[in-house]
Amino acid sequence: MAESAKIINMIKPGQVIQKKIISDQEYIFRYPQEDDVGLLCAYINELSQERTFIRFQGEEVTLEAEEKYVTANLRKMAEREKVVILVFADDILVGSAEVTMKEKTEKHRGLIGVTIKKDYRDRGLGSELLQLVVVQAKQELPNLEILELRVYANNDRAIHLYKKLGFKGFGRLPRGIKRDDGYVDRIYMFKNVK
């Protein structure tokens, strides 16, 4: 995806941002809407059961908790404090990315989060989604100057992608993540966008 992608100037819940074929599959990238609560709840619970590279490690999110989360995200998006993009393949939610602005003295920094459903990884979808959320965040978040992210030190694929897209490491917290099977270091990365 190029920086020249058509950019939507105002976030509208449910609005399609882009349709693209990647590895012979058509994907629809769009903003979330209130009706997505059930899909998002099932999505995060499926990722949680994988016990992979996200904070959720088998916990189950309730529909009520997800509804509060989605409502808060839509409010933050309307206030230009957050960008969230969902990816669909054949009406199935297969990915999500967001940039959330920090507050007060850190209000120029946005924290990125990206997830892709297991069966849709290693197809270039994560790269496309990350690039698109960066483009949209630069357009929609007026205070954004620095993007940052946190990644498990043993998530080599993600670290490679982030470096390829211009992110640089700025720290490592030994044993920063505690899982049932032990500890993993957490790596911190950033990219200046302004």
Image (spheres, grey):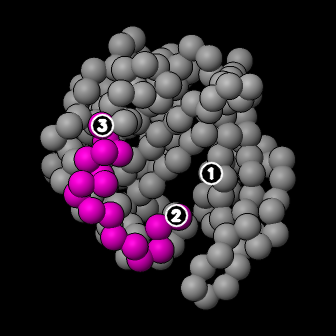
What amino acid does circle 1 point to? Leu
Residue at 45% x, 55% y is 115
Q: Residue 161: which disc?
A: 1
What amino acid does circle 3 point to? Thr
The magenta span reads 55-71
Q: Secondary structure at mark 3?
A: helix
Mark 2 burial class by Cα count in 10 Å: few <14, some 14-19, many 20+? some
Task: Look at mark 2 in the image and give the residue it sits on.
Answer: 54
Task: Look at mark 3 in the image and give the residue it sits on.
Answer: 71
Q: CA distance from mark 3 to mark 2?
A: 22 Å
Residue at 36% x, 51% y is 95
Q: CA distance from mark 1 to mark 3?
A: 31 Å
Residue at 57% x, 14% y is 142
Q: CA distance from mark 1 to mark 2?
A: 16 Å
Which of the marked residues, 1 or 3, is nearer the chain's N terminus?
3
On the image, the x and y values in percent for residue 48 come to: 40, 70
What amino acid does circle 2 point to? Ile
